[in-house]
Image (tube, rainbow, N blue to C red):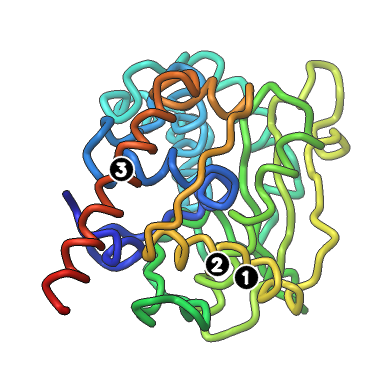
Amino acid sequence: MRDLRKFGTKEWPVHPSGARVLIMCPWRIVMPYLGLVPEDDSSGQAADTGSAMHKAAELFHKGASVAEAIVGMREQVRKYPLAVLAEAAQMFLGYSCDSRNRDANLVLCEEPLAFSIEAAPDDPTGERIEVVATTDQVRFDGYRYKCYDIKTSKRSPVEVMSESWYQMGLYCVGASIKLGKLVEPGGLIMPRNYKPGVDPSSAPVFYLFNYKAAWIDELVWPLRRAVADVRRGAIHHFPDPNGCKYCHQGHPDICFPKLMQLKQELRTTASAVELSVT
């Protein structure tokens, strides 16, 4: 069995996209770490369509024309084989015609990040928590640097924003380290809200976060606590209809017995160590 004390290290870093799940139901994140279920690659039609749209936007911001960006998106379809390319192209066309995007000054675009944050005070290892990510966009408006994330979800903006709070906070931390400048929470860009006959530059696609960069330390605190708990073996499970729907196990009846088995193994190991010491 993999050593839980190595969780959140370079051996198995934390991903911002999984931060919320790690805080709410760490067992869902720990199961693939222990090899009990396959690692979640988030592949599916919706995810791949989003990846395709992201690729077109990336190419556009890195100098490609609208037509070249769509061609480039199609040429890399092997990276997102389940994508509905016509749907991705339609979202991108609205995005590229929006002056708020066309004229934006992007200083980072689809930029890989690797950074670390301090462990919780009572973390049994004391090792810093390693985080890896690819931040979507950091824009400079002439005064401040702000992070933005394109979300192609069909769900309501309020729901998607609630799920993205921790992700955005960690992006800001990593981007600030990368640039050596303070990067503040910007918002989400939801290109499905571009509609035919409506000026893209006034379409309701920007949904802004209202928390401040100074609050991010407090936002990251539950993540530090969650990693410390995993490292000490204090793992919990939180059954939730929405969360379980996206979990490999699908239902608490399947995953909870596995958690109970792990806890028994940890207790047995701890007892064995105590006996050998005494």
Asked whether the beta carbons under mark 1 and mark 2 sit within 8 Å of each other, the answer is yes
Task: Report, in whole angstroms, how far the alpha carbon at label 3 lies from the one at label 1.
Answer: 26 Å
At 43% across and 34% down in the image, what residue appears? Answer: 68
Q: Position of residue 109 (x, y in %)?
A: 50, 57
Quick one: label 3 or label 1, which is nearer the N terminus? 1
Mark 2 vs mark 3: give the one in front. Answer: 3
Question: Which amino acid does the dot numbered 2 rest on?
Answer: Arg
- Using the image, determine if residue 200 lies above or below residue 166: above
Dot 2 alpha-carbon crowd within 10 angstroms: few under 14, some 14 to 19, many 20 or more: some
Q: Position of residue 219 (x, y in %)?
A: 68, 66
Nearer to the camera, 156 or 256: 256
Q: Would you name the residue on which mark 3 appears? A: 262
Mark 1 vs mark 2: give the one in front. Answer: 2
Mark 3 vs mark 1: give the one in front. Answer: 3
Question: Which amino acid does the dot numbered 1 rest on?
Answer: Trp
Res. 221 mark: 1
At 50% across and 55% down in the image, what residue appears? Answer: 16
Q: Quarter-wise, where is residue 27 in the image?
A: top left
- Using the image, determine if residue 89 lies above or below residue 180: above
Dot 3 alpha-carbon crowd within 10 angstroms: few under 14, some 14 to 19, many 20 or more: some
Q: Is disc 2 placed on a helix, strand or loop?
A: helix
Q: Would you name the residue on which mark 2 appears? A: 225
- Using the image, determine if residue 2 lies above or below residue 212: above
At 41% across and 44% down in the image, what residue appears? Answer: 29
Task: Report, in whole angstroms, how far the alpha carbon at label 2 lies from the one at label 3.
Answer: 20 Å
At 61% across and 20% down in the image, what residue appears? Answer: 90
